[in-house]
Amino acid sequence: MQFFRNIWPVVVIVGTIAGAAWTAAWSVRDFMTTQIAASEARLSAQIAATETRLTARVAATDSHLTEQIAATDSRLTERIAATDSRLTEQIAATDSRLTERIVATHNRLAAQIATTDNRLAGQIAATHDQLTAQIAATDDRIPTLEDRLTAQIAEAETRLSEQIGEFRMLIVDHLEDHANAR
């Protein structure tokens, strides 16, 4: 029993401390809950304000970009139209110049072809006349050549006959000399 009497003050002190700690813990919990709720409310208000500000800025930026795109589109459309007009004029001028040059080149080539054709026709006619004259001269010389060749052949035959006759005489003389020598 003495033990319970001695321990009772310790239990009371420990209980008091535990109760105070429990009360303090609940107070801290309530304080933290209040602080968290206040922070949440503050953050929600800041988020809503930021969202409102960003929405306004996005709308302003969108409007500004739409205006800039419209202005750029208008400027580009004008520049494209001007470039198209300028290129059309340049193409027309180039086409006209090329047509003139083609016509001039065609006329010059036609004149050169006609000149060359006339010159070749003259050369062909002259060559034809020259060949005709050469053929006629050759035809005139053929009978003379034939007569000369006939005479040369006859003369060669005569010389050959004489040589054959002389050779026969030599053979006959040689045979007679051989026969006499036996």
Image (cartoon, rainbow, N blue to C red):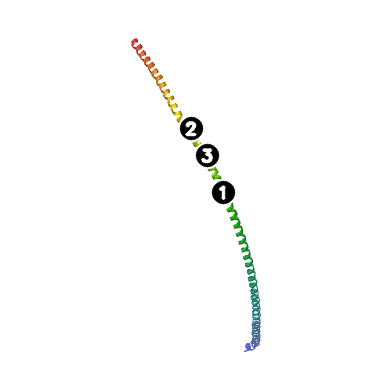
Q: Which of the 4 quarters of the picture holds residue 30?
A: bottom right
- Residue drawn at x 63%, y 67% is 74
Tell me, yes or no, whether the two marked residues, 3 and 2, touch with CB atoms within 8 Å: no
- Residue drawn at x 43%, y 27% is 143
Query: In this rendering, would 17 be left or right of 152?
Result: right
* Structural crowding at the residue carrying mark 1, measured as other residues with C-alpha within 10 Å and reported as few (<14), some (14–19) or many (≥20): few
Element at badge 1? Answer: helix
Element at badge 2? Answer: helix
N-terminal of the pair, mark 1 or mark 3, is 1
Q: Which of the 4 quarters of the picture holds residue 68?
A: bottom right
Establish if 168 lies above or below 25. above
The amino acid at mark 1 is Asn
Foreground residue among 27 and 19: 27
Query: In this rendering, would 129 be left or right of 12?
Result: left
Foreground residue among 31 and 122: 122
Q: CA separation, marks 1 and 2?
A: 40 Å
Q: Which residue is mark 3?
A: 122
The amino acid at mark 3 is Gly
The quarter of the picture where the C terminus appears is top left
Residue 49 x, y percent position in the rendering: 66, 78
Element at badge 3? Answer: helix
Q: Which residue is mark 1?
A: 107
N-terminal of the pair, mark 3 or mark 2, is 3
* Structural crowding at the residue carrying mark 3, measured as other residues with C-alpha within 10 Å and reported as few (<14), some (14–19) or many (≥20): few
The disc placed on residue 134 is: 2
Q: CA separation, marks 3 and 2?
A: 18 Å
Residue 12 x, y percent position in the rendering: 65, 87
Foreground residue among 173 and 66: 173
Residue 86 x, y percent position in the rendering: 62, 60
The amino acid at mark 2 is Gln
Q: CA separation, marks 1 and 3?
A: 23 Å
